[in-house]
Image (cartoon, rainbow, N blue to C red):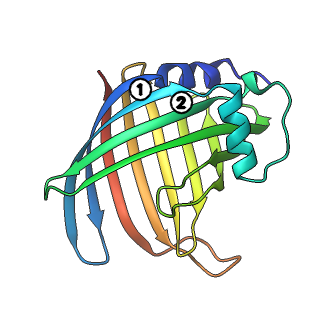
Amino acid sequence: MNTSIFDQFFADCIGNWQSDRTYHYLTHKEIERSRTTFHVDPLTSEQKTKVLTDNSYNKLDNLEQFPGFNLGFYTISEKGEEVRQNLNLMFVPKSNNGSIIEGDYLRDRAYEEARAIVSHFCFDTNTRELLMTTNYTRLVSVDSITLTNPTLRIRKILNYEKPPTGKPLKNVLLVGFGVEQKV
């Protein structure tokens, strides 16, 4: 599996970032702006083992080959609402079909629900877009990060009402857009 562009994407994500985002809440016709500062550090093998254990995930050999981060962030909305969070996450590639790498995206703490969670990711080596899909209890979050260059990322977030099993995503609850710059 040729993962050099995939590996470079994650190497470029290490560091301090600032994000300006706009959220469109379609359920109650509200628009909210926020600013987030976050710091991204690579995970150690011990931290990766803990993320795997927290998710009851199968043991993996050669943990150094799997990208993982400690992500700490602080967000303040234009209304003055503040959120601080720190979580560990890692990516486990499972297949490589041409320019698309897919696999599992594991976190020790999810954004919408305070629990460990395994999600799905898809990375396009041509566009350098990382697409992460998380099935929560009541919604499905589809989060896209496109690395345009090593210091600029474009973010898109779509939260859908969780459809019945086997049905497609349809009812959008929230749309978010962001510009993230390395500082």
Q: Residue at x 27, y 63 (%)?
A: 24
How packed mark 2 is, by other alpha carbons closer than 10 Å (few <14, some 14-19, many 20 or more), is many
Position of residue 133 in the picture relative to residue 14 (left or right) = right
Q: Residue at x 73, y 22 (%)?
A: 64
Percent of width and height locating residue 151: 36, 20
Q: Secondary structure at mark 1?
A: strand
Q: Nearer the viewer, residue 62 or 28?
A: 62
Percent of width and height locating residue 165: 69, 78
Q: Secondary structure at mark 2?
A: loop
Residue 101 in view in this figure: no
Q: Is the N terminus in the top left, top right, bottom left or bottom right quadrant? A: top right
Which of marks 1 and 2 precedes in the sequence?
A: 2
Give amino acid for label 2.
Arg
Q: Residue at x 58, y 18 (%)?
A: 8
Residue position for label 2: 128
The quadrant in which residue 29 appears is bottom left
Q: Residue at x 55, y 39 (%)?
A: 130
Position of residue 66 in the picture relative to residue 126 (left or right) = right
Percent of width and height locating residue 145: 46, 39
Farthest bottom residue in view: 164
Residue position for label 1: 148
